[in-house]
Amino acid sequence: MNAGNYDTEDLIAALATPFAASALAVIRCSGDGSISTVSRCFSEPDLLINADHGRLVHGLFLHPDTSEPLDDVVLGVYRAPGGYTGEDSVEVFCHGSLPGIEAILKALSKAGFRDALPGEFTFRAFLHGKIDLTRAEAVQEIVSSKSGKAHRFALNRLSGALFDRIEQVKQRLADILSILEVQLDYAEDEIGGEVSIPLDQAEEAMEHISQLAQSYRTGRMFHEGASIAFAGKTNAGKSSLFNLFLKEDRSIVSEVHGTTRDYIESWISIEGMPARLFDTAGVRDAFDAVEQEGIRRSLDIVQKSDLVLHVFDGITGMNEQEAQFFQQQLGNPSYLFLWNKADSPHAMEAPEGTIAVSALTAQGFHELEQTVLGRLLGNRAASIEQEQVMIDSLRQKELLDRASDALKMFLKASDEQMPVDILASELHDALDALGQLTGEVTSDDILERIFSGFCVGK
Ligand SMILES: Nc1nc2c(ncn2[C@@H]2O[C@H](COP(=O)(O)OP(=O)(O)OP(=O)(O)O)[C@@H](O)[C@H]2O)c(=O)[nH]1
Ligand SMILES: [Mg+2]
């Protein structure tokens, strides 16, 4: 079977580590006949050809035509159906020298390997039934995870936790469907009156599916990170608070108004959740065009961010404009209002609806972090630690929504005593969506789209 550009009969090879000078590099080779083809580039061909699955063989990597030695290497041998791809494959552990890597890749191409496309090794693993689609996507999510927690959640999906959950739901729906199909296949008198449909099972299945779908927002936040921007007028202490979050002196702080003239960004981690934090230019009637442009860009960043930390100067208090803005946005879930400089004896009391903080003494900082987390994750913040399975793929979310909608229709139709074939068709729809999620029934172009987002060598 082929999907789009992936020709699965070919021998493929690719560098699996970054193309950069390093101690070691790994080149992956896979395909039926790959072991004997690599042996043509190896000083110990018999050792390699006779090596069992999972063995390492040491020798020289040679040019297949000239036998010129290219590097001292160790080869890892995998035999079908073992290994990552489920087909015969070899991993070349060589020195991480750029000319050396290039020479080995060229030699492999000469021997008959073509360059692997992004995600092609994982695609083959999927085709050979080594992994389902939820696990394949988890592979990519692990590689691109930005925080320890995102990595842990993806690892959990790779272990099959998401797949198992979905299989359980599918099993339940299939059981209900079989009851309906008996009714469709036989006349009522043949099966002795009406058979009751276990609606509670369908409701429970729907509950499981919606829970998974709802975990998307949190999963995405942990995977991609949220964007958080400081805003407020000049000298309020935005840069000082920005530095406090970063735990380093990154943004310039001074008592001069208009110190920050452009936005600055940096990645931070709030209790394991990655976030892009932006310091912005303070808003005021700027004198010059450069500052005006900085303010314009900053307002743009603020508008696009998931959460705005609007900083008030606790010593000067709010001016009229700020007071008006505060009243307008008080209930806006995308805004948190900070009353900074709370350490100062000249600071006024923090008005209700603001969080008293001090960039100088870090007073209120822990509470601020918790509040930020709560705002971004909603009521799920507290349950993250217990959360077993989470999704962070939009594709998976859409399919779960489709399954959940179909089940809703099923329950409604059953409530309205609709004919059995209509009920069965809704269940089929739900099962189809779940089947697409695990990759049991997925069209080639969707497969190609998923795997082409991977890195080369994965
Ligand atoms: N006492 C006290 N002073 C602070 C605090 N935070 C900031 N400041 C002082 O306030 C002044 C302005 O701080 P910045 O962090 O540069 O303020 P900003 O909002 O980034 O200002 P612009 O970049 O001009 O928009 C500096 O002199 C800081 O030392 C605080 O929590 N307590
Ligand atoms: Mg600043």
Image (cartoon, grey):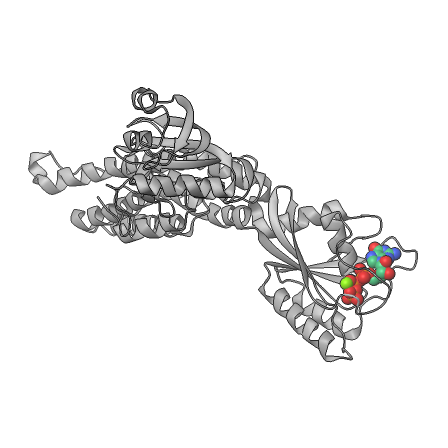
User: Where does the N terminus fall, quadrant-wise?
Assistant: top left
Side of 139 where 321 appears, left or right: right
Q: Is residue 298 above or below residue 3?
A: below
Q: Which residue is at a point 50% across and 38% down the rendered structure image?
A: 153
Quadrant housing residue 300: bottom right
Q: Is residue 58 above or below residue 334?
A: above
User: Where does the C terminus fall, quadrant-wise?
Assistant: top left
Q: Which residue is at a point 59% across and 44% down the rendered structure image?
A: 381
Residue 47 in the image: x percent, y percent?
A: 34, 20
Q: Is residue 411 above or below residue 95?
A: below
Residue 205 in the image: x percent, y percent?
A: 35, 40
Residue 324 in the image: x percent, y percent?
A: 72, 72
Q: Is residue 406 above or below residue 165?
A: below
Query: Depth check: 125 or 352 in front?
Result: 125
Q: For residue 32, say whether it is visible.
A: yes
Query: Depth check: 246 or 237 in front?
Result: 246
Q: For residue 123, say whether it is visible.
A: no
The image quadrant where one finds ligand 2 is bottom right
Q: Which residue is at a point 52% across and 47% down the rendered structure image?
A: 223
Query: Depth check: 94 or 192 in front?
Result: 94
Q: Which residue is at a point 30% across and 23% down the rendered structure image?
A: 49
Residue 241 in the image: x percent, y percent?
A: 76, 55
Quadrant housing residue 350: bottom right
Query: Depth check: 387 or 379 in front?
Result: 387
Quadrant housing residue 104: top left
